[in-house]
């Protein structure tokens, strides 16, 4: 595995539970940035059941990606990351990039667990906003974040003001 990418799911409409316009725009913009990063690598997208719609937007834009849904990524599962680490390890030899799409706690806490267990390096949690990603370059043992670049048509402030 060259890299592990953690994505915080897009913004959800509280009424229907689906991605709202801003959430859809964020995920599409993030997917465009991923295409530049991963090129034609083999990609596997893991998603929690409630983050599936965000993951599907990524999968559509990254043509060589496969999507799998796992309950261990849901907030109701708790945050014992040993099962998630086992899942990542089980695929690491056959997949170049693994993308995990989930929610706040998982996306912000798993990198701390992963880097300590796999790299022996302690890192501080980074708070990601909806639609942002944290990339862990497993070859260089380095972390960085990616934020979507919106077209300017929709911003969080202007959308909420509608």
Image: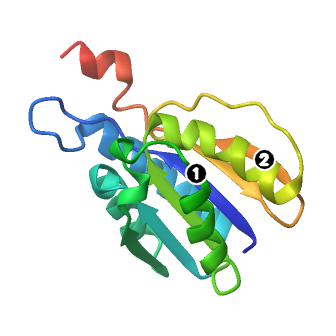
Task: Name the residue rendered at 67%, 31% in the picture.
Answer: 126
Name the residue that disc number 1 marks. 81
In the depicted structure, whether residue 123 falls above or below residue 66: above
**How many residues crowd mark 2 within 10 Å: few (<14), some (14–19), many (20+)?**
some
Q: Residue furthest bottom?
A: 94
**Extreme residue in the left direction:** 15
Residue 17 place in picture, x, y as percent: 16, 40
List x then y, in percent, for residue 116: 81, 48
* Residue 133 in sight in this render: yes
Left or right of residue 52: residue 27: right
- x%, y% of residue 87? 56, 70
Q: Residue furthest top?
A: 161
| 74, 15: nearer the viewer | 74
- In the rendered view, does 5 fall on the left or right side of 56? right
Q: How is the image coloured?
A: rainbow
Q: Residue 82: which quarter of the image? A: bottom right
The N terminus, quarter of image: bottom right
Q: Earlier along the polypeptide chain: callout 2 or callout 1?
A: 1
Q: Residues within 10 Å of mark 1 (few under 14, many from 20)?
A: some
Please tell me whether residue 94 is drawn above or below residue 19 in the rendered image: below
Indicate the secondary structure of the residue bearing disc 2.
Answer: strand
Which is more toward the observer, 121 or 4?
121
Question: Residue 15 location in percent, x, y?
Answer: 9, 31
Residue at 24% x, 43% y is 19
Q: Is residue 146 left or right of residue 61?
A: right
**On the image, numbered disc 2 is attached to which residue?**
143
């Amino acid at each position: 595995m060259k890299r592990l990418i953690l994505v915080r799911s897009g913004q959800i409409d509280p009424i229907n539970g689906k991605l709202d316009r801003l959430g859809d725009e964020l995920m599409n913009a993030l997917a465009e940035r991923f295409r530049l990063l991963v090129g034609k690598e083999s990609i596997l997208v893991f998603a929690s059941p409630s983050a599936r719609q965000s993951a599907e937007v990524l999968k559509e834009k990254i043509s060589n990606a496969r999507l799998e849904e796992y309950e261990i990524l849901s907030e109701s599962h708790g945050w014992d990351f040993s099962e998630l680490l086992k899942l990542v390890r089980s695929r690491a030899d056959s997949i170049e990039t693994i993308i995990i799409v989930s929610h706040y706690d998982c996306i912000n806490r798993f990198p701390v667990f992963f880097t300590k267990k796999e790299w022996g390096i302690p890192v501080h949690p980074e708070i990601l906003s909806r639609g942002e990603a944290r990339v862990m370059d497993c070859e260089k043992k380095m972390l960085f974040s990616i934020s979507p670049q919106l077209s300017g048509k929709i911003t969080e402030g202007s959308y909420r003001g509608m």
